[in-house]
Structure formats: C-alpha cells, structure tokens
C-alpha cells in the first residue's frame, strides 16, 4: 500500500471531555496516517450521554492539540440508514436472533467496551427461541469454538475463541439503535478505512468485528492497538479523570508540545512499519 492509499480515522465519543489518553492514541493514529487520509467521526449514538457541548469542546480540543483531518467530521447519528442496511443483511443471512435478556448489558452496547466492563459471556437463553415477545434486542450468534486470529500492528498475533472468550453479542437494541460493534464495522467499511488505530482495551472487540465483516461480505481493515495510558495508581485513564482532561490541562498552562514531549517515538508510519 502506498502512503496516499492509507485511510485512518479518529473516532471520539462526545460523552465527556477528551483526556490525555485519548490524545496519545489519536496522535498515534495521526502519525500513522501521515501522507494518507485521516477521517474524523463523531460517535454520538448514545442519546443519554452525548451532549452538544461535548461535541463543541471535542472539536476545540482536537484543533488545539494539533490534530488535522482531511475528511469529516461525520456524525454517527446522521448515518442510521447505513447501520439499518447492515442489520437487515445480517438478519436476512440468519446471523442474528431476537433476545429479551440482560437489560444492563444491552444498555452498555452503545459504547465501546473497555477492560473491566466487558459484558459477561452470554448464556444462550434466547438462542433457540422461535417466538419472543416483548422488547427485543438482536444478538449475533457466534460460531462456538471457532478460533479468531489476527495480527495486530503493535501486539502481534492475537487469538480468541468464540463462545469462550466472548459470546453472542448485541448488534441492535430494542430502542432502535445499532450497538457499537455493528456501527463501527459499517462505518469503517463505508469510509474505506485501511487501518483502525485504537486502545488495547478493544482487542477483544476486534474478534467480534471480524465476524461481522465476514458475515457482511466486507473486507476488514488492519488493526493497531495502542498501550493504554494510566494514572499514578495504574488505573486506565477515563473521562472521570478531569484533572487530565485536555481542557483542564490547557487551563493550567500546558501546551500540546509539552504534553507530547514525554511520549517519545510512539509508532512508525503505518506504511513503513508493515
């Protein structure tokens, strides 16, 4: 692949202020996209948590930090037809089943799952039900026992077993919204993303998404998962870490250059490192 053919993406979710961990992962994504195209996608499907003020500050913080994208921003909330088409195709192909289980897990399905809050392995309660009444969520039926393998650009070969490391997962919610796993696959395919750069907490999600790519007849991108940034106690940074939000750091006089000074060489250019 030539540099000009490379297509990467930044995909923040406006549920709070961007923090330093986001900035480092996004910076790696930008560095790997040098010479190619970087797409900005606003992942705003969570109607309860995504706020207009967070969209505004997200864009301000990204520009302040020095991010430059060539396409976007695109909002997921304006791309529902794309997700619905993917859902219809999966359903027609027999890959989904209706489910009335686990309201708590379904509530989490809009957001990218992180280490420590992955949904429990699904018990298969509704797998063989021919008739389901009430409020229905749709799950993807994983091929139990199949080994899902991929080579990550940073961590190397990865192996997960369907039905053991992850179970049947939600792709469409009862409130008529696509789950994270389906939305990002549909987006990345339609936007012709050649490499997905994101945090290491989403390695397991990649196994799920590879099954979706296959079921939809889509070519999957390459993946590069970045080490997570932690606080002094070793806890992964989250949006609750207000002291390390880009907005707060800027208020204290920090500059993007000073914040990046300790990162060193985070990653090589994607084309050169393949």
Image: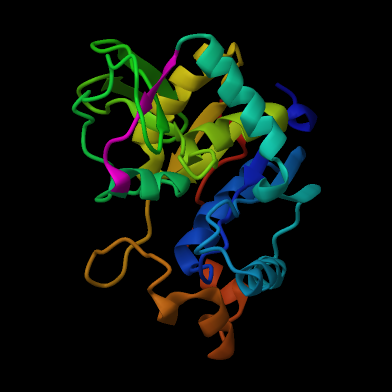
Colour treatment of the image: rainbow
Residue drawn at 72 percent across, 33 percent down? 191
Closer-to-camera residue (68/77): 77
> Is residue 35 found left or right of 209 in the rendered image?
right
Residue drawn at 50 percent across, 60 percent down? 22
Residue drawn at 44 percent across, 14 percent down? 95
Quadrant assignment, res 254 = bottom right
Closer-to-camera residue (74/241): 74
Residue 38, given in percent of the width and then of the height, sits at 72, 44
Can the viewer see residue 155?
no
Quadrant containing the C terminus in the rendered view: top right
> Image height check: is 150 above or below 180?
above
Residue 99, given in percent of the width and then of the height, sits at 34, 29
Can the viewer see residue 77?
yes
> Is residue 122 found left or right of 67 in the rendered image?
left
> Is residue 204 found left or right of 21 in the rendered image?
left
66 falls in the magenta region? no
> Is residue 145 found left or right of 174 in the rendered image?
left
Residue 32, given in percent of the width and then of the height, sits at 62, 42
Quadrant containing the N terminus in the rendered view: top right
> Image height check: is 128 above or below 192?
above
Residue most extreme to the bottom: 252
Quadrant assignment, res 79 = top right
Residue 185, given in percent of the width and then of the height, sits at 56, 30
> Image height check: is 28 above or below 172?
below
* Number of numbered discs overlaid on the protein picture: 0
Magenta-tinted stretch = 95-103
Residue drawn at 38 percent across, 50 percent down? 107
């Amino acid at each position: 692949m030539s540099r000009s053919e490379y297509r990467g993406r930044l995909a923040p979710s406006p549920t709070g202020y961007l923090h330093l961990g986001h900035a480092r992962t996004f910076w790696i994504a930008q560095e790997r996209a040098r010479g190619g195209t970087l797409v900005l996608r606003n992942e705003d499907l969570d109607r309860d948590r995504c706020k207009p003020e967070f969209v505004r500050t997200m864009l301000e913080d990204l520009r302040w930090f020095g991010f430059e994208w060539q396409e976007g921003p695109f909002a997921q909330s304006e791309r529902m037809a794309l997700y619905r088409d993917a859902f219809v195709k999966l359903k027609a192909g027999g890959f989904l089943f209706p489910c009335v289980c686990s309201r708590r897990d379904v509530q989490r399905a809009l957001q990218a799952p992180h280490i420590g809050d992955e949904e429990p392995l699904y018990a298969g309660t509704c797998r063989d039900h021919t008739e389901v009444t009430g409020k229905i969520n749709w799950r993807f039926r994983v091929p139990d026992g199949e080994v899902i393998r991929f080579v990550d650009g940073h961590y190397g070969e990865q192996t997960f077993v369907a039905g053991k490391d992850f179970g049947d997962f939600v792709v469409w919610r009862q409130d008529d919204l696509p789950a994270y796993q389906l939305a990002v696959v549909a987006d990345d395919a339609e936007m012709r993303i050649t490499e997905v750069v994101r945090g290491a907490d989403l390695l397991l999600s990649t196994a799920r998404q590879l099954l979706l790519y296959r079921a939809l007849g889509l070519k999957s991108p390459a993946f590069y998962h970045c080490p997570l940034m932690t606080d002094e106690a070793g806890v992964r940074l989250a949006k609750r870490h207000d002291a390390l939000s880009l907005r707060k750091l800027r208020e204290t006089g920090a500059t993007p250059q000073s914040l990046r000074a300790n990162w060193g060489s985070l990653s090589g250019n994607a084309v050169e490192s393949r």
